[in-house]
Amino acid sequence: MSLTYTNYLKVQELLDLQKPKSEPVEHDEMLFIVIHQSYELWFKQILHEFDKLRRDLEAGKTWASAKTMRRVLTILKTMVSQVDILETMTPLEFNSFRGFLEQASGFQSVQFREMEILCGMRSKHIIDVHKDQPELQQQLIERQKEQTLWESFCSFLQVKGFDIETPKRVNEQGLIHESSDKNQQELIHIMNNDPEAALLCELFVDYDEGLQEWRYRHVKMVERTIGTKRGTGGSGGASYLYKTLNNPIFPDLWEIRTKF
């Protein structure tokens, strides 16, 4: 068989992956499945881009790194805008099939947790939640051994000849790296004297801000749909998600704003 659009993209297999659980099937469950499967595809692409980004940073490739960051930022904006589609579903429409989801929850998204890990976030709970699936636990544990984005960025600055300290992993919960006064002083020098490195600094801030925007839209969507009820997987729902807001992953790049 010759290569076609359909068999190259495995369109039929892709379209067979949407399997509503509600009986009789509720109309809006299809939207719920398609949106979340789309998110998982975007998470996969971001992880793919992060692999390249870290390699390029550690090799000192400024423009290759900037190009990849711009792509990730565009993907992130697309993910945020998809919340608008999900919000066309009313609380009544969601609750018409919510009970059929049993313990399934977005809290269990392994790929999103991988993204968080590469951003430097750690939580014993997100490992423990997969205790019944040891292969997934191991996947997350292996990710924790990899370079974080901030570690790779600091390596980039070192390659460029700047006096940046390698971040130390000091926390087992939350952000593993603490902010560094020494690195902040060097970052101020970079922002004033190296436009190319400064551009990359700003792209990292863009990503940090974009991730916080994604979290905010997500929590408001959850609150709008189920109020203060607990999540399907036993998570705290909106109350848990609120705790994830306003937690920058690159604090040094934010703290220098007050020092210019």
Image: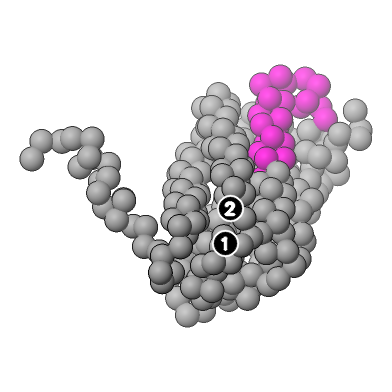
Query: In the rendered image, which quarter is residue 191 located in?
Result: top right
Q: Nearer the viewer, residue 65 or 216?
A: 216
> What's drawn in magenta, residue-wise?
188-211
Q: Amino acid at mark 2?
A: Met
Q: Which residue appears at 29% of the width and 56% of the height?
A: 16
Q: Is residue 51 visible?
A: no
Q: CA distance from mark 2 to mark 1?
A: 7 Å
Amino acid found under the numbered disc labelled 1: Phe
Which quadrant of the figure has residue 69? Answer: top right
Residue 98 visible in the current orientation: yes
Mark 2 is surrounded, within 10 Å at the Cα level, by few (under 14), some (14 to 19) or many (20 or more) other residues, namely some
Residue position for label 1:
94
At 33% from the left and 57% from the top, the residue drawn is 17
Which x, y percent locates residue 190? Answer: 76, 27
Quadrant holding the N terminus: top left
Predominant SS along the magenta part: helix
Q: Give how far across and how far down residue 257 sits, in percent.
A: 86, 34
SS for tag 1?
helix
**Is disc 2 in contact with disc 1, using a CB cutoff of under 8 Å?**
yes
- In the image, is residue 146 above or below residue 211? below
- What's the mark number on residue 89? 2
> Does residue 188 appear to the left or right of 157 in the view shown?
right
The colour scheme used to paint the residues is: one colour
